[in-house]
Image (cartoon, rainbow, N blue to C red):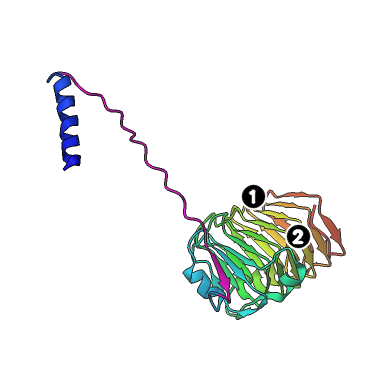
Amino acid sequence: MKKFLTIGLVLFLITGCFGEDEKIEVEVNDEPEEVEERAGETLNVPGDYETISLAIENADNGDTIVVEVGRYEEDLNFDGKNIKLTSSDPNNEEIVAETIIQGSGNGPVIRIDSGESSETVVTGFTITGGKYDYGAAINVGPLLSRTSPTISNNIFTENTAMYGGAIYLHESNAIIKNNQFIENIATMSGGAIYASSNASITIENNIFRNNHADLYGGAIFVTMSSPVISGNQFIENIAEVSDGAISVVGDEANPEIDDNEFTDNEPNDMSD
């Protein structure tokens, strides 16, 4: 009862103090309320989910999937989700070597081909056993353009593709850094990496060793793209036709190549 009496008194005072023609100005804040962004959750494999695939299926944008040491025999698809996939310690070489994603040999080990943003991360794994036409370890594109993950602190070994034995990039702004590419094979070009179709990527501080291409680019093949390739080591990579380390083909290819080390690549490091 007290509440109703108080409201009535306030209304009486307002209507009594102002005439019919007088207006009351009320300041209204029409700006939308700030909604706190959802903090990403951590999903543990195999603690919370037995497989990496199941963890990805249950993850939302912004989540982190942490994978413990072990061999995981599965093919993965990020399916458009902007998530971080990481081993328990990407900076520990022993953990990286012992946290293995083993592909089935029936496609790329990891698909990141549905427009994933730069918030998407793959870090701290040994990725092996992929077999596919385009990027046997990680296929970035070409279903949707500007798929742009960060790929770091991984070991790519014994993957085989026609183009890009380890990674194929199509219309991407991906960052590829601090990885090791060892003994990957392209039956055409780009023993480790194939960059095409406006792939403005960054390839820095990686080690390329003993990768092989049947045609061009024992380690890296670039066409119609402008990647930055810097601070890498190219050691004993082989291309059967030309450019054991880096092959650049076409007038529309304008890479920035700087501060790399070349050792015993065959038949040459790169063309002038």
Residue type at the position of mark 1? Glu
**Residue sticking out furthest to the front:** 2
**Residue sticking out furthest to the left:** 20
Q: Which residue is mark 1?
A: 252
Quadrant of the rendered structure where residue 132 is? bottom right
Q: Secondary structure at mark 2?
A: loop
Q: Which residue is mark 2?
A: 206
Residue 26 located within the stretch drawn in magenta = yes
Q: Is residue 132 left or right of residue 210?
A: left
Image label count: 2
Tell me if residue 158 can be seen.
Answer: no
Q: Secondary structure at mark 1?
A: loop
**Which residue is depicted at the point 84% across and 56% down?**
261
Residue nearer the viewer, 133 or 81: 81
Figure quadrant of the N terminus: top left
Residue type at the position of mark 2? Asn
Q: Which mark is residue 90?
A: none
- Span shown in magenta: 22-47
Residue nearer the viewer, 119 or 132: 119
Quadrant of the rendered structure where residue 207 is? bottom right
